[in-house]
C-alpha cells in the first residue's frame, strides 16, 4: 500500500464543514521548511485532491498550516485585533507508507486534531 495524506476541516461552532479555508503543506528537514503546495477546502471541508498523493509520498516530518483567521473573517466571525486563532500549524511525522488523515476541528477560540482514518 502506498502512503498518502488527506485532511478534513469542520467548523464546530457552526456545525458544518469549513469551506474555503486555505491550507499550506510543508516538508520539514532539520531546520529547513520547504513549501510543497497550497490547497483550499471545498464545500465538504475537504480538498479536491489528496494533499500529498501516493506519487509524492515520502516518510518524514510535515507541517500543515491552516489559515483559520482568514476563514473566520470570511464567514463573518466578529473580528478581534489580533484574532485569537489565525494561523494554525500542525507538525506531525509519517513513519509508514499508509493513509494519514489529519483533520482539524475548529472554532473561533479552540481547535483539536487527531490521526483519523
Image (tube, helix red, strand yellow):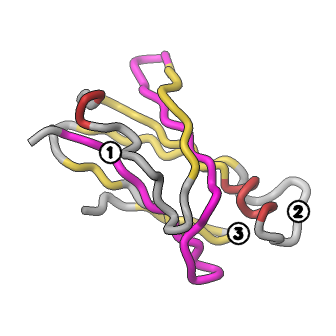
Category of crowding for the residue at label 1, using alpha-carbon neighbours closer than 10 angstroms: few (below 14), some (14–19), many (at least 20): some
Residue 74 placement, left or right of 21: right
Q: Position of residue 57 (x, y in %)?
A: 27, 31
Q: Quadrant of the C terminus?
A: bottom left
Q: What segment carries the magenta color?
A: 3-32
Category of crowding for the residue at label 3, using alpha-carbon neighbours closer than 10 angstroms: few (below 14), some (14–19), many (at least 20): some
Total tally of numbered discs in the picture: 3
Q: Quadrant of the N terminus?
A: top left
Residue named by callout 2: 80
Residue named by callout 1: 5
Q: CA distance from mark 2 to mark 3?
A: 10 Å
Instruction: In the rendered view, tell whether residue 96 sits above or below residue 19.
Output: above
Residue named by callout 3: 108
Q: Residue at x 67, y 47 (%)?
A: 87
Q: Position of residue 116 (x, y in %)?
A: 30, 62
Question: Does label 2 or label 3 sit earlier along the sequence?
Answer: 2
Quadrant of residue 94 within the rendered picture: top left
Amino acid at each position: 500500500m502506498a502512503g498518502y495524506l488527506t485532511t478534513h476541516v469542520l467548523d464546530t461552532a457552526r456545525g458544518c464543514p469549513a469551506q474555503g479555508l486555505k491550507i499550506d503543506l510543508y516538508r520539514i528537514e532539520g531546520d529547513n521548511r520547504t513549501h510543497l503546495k497550497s490547497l483550499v477546502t471545498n464545500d465538504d471541508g475537504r480538498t479536491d485532491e489528496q494533499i500529498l498523493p501516493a506519487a509524492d509520498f515520502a516518510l518524514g516530518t510535515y507541517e500543515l498550516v491552516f489559515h483559520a483567521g482568514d476563514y473566520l473573517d470570511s464567514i463573518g466571525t466578529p473580528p478581534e485585533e489580533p484574532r485569537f486563532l489565525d494561523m494554525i500549524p500542525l507538525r506531525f511525522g509519517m513513519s509508514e507508507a499508509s493513509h494519514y488523515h489529519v483533520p482539524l476541528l475548529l472554532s473561533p477560540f479552540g481547535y483539536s486534531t487527531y490521526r483519523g482514518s
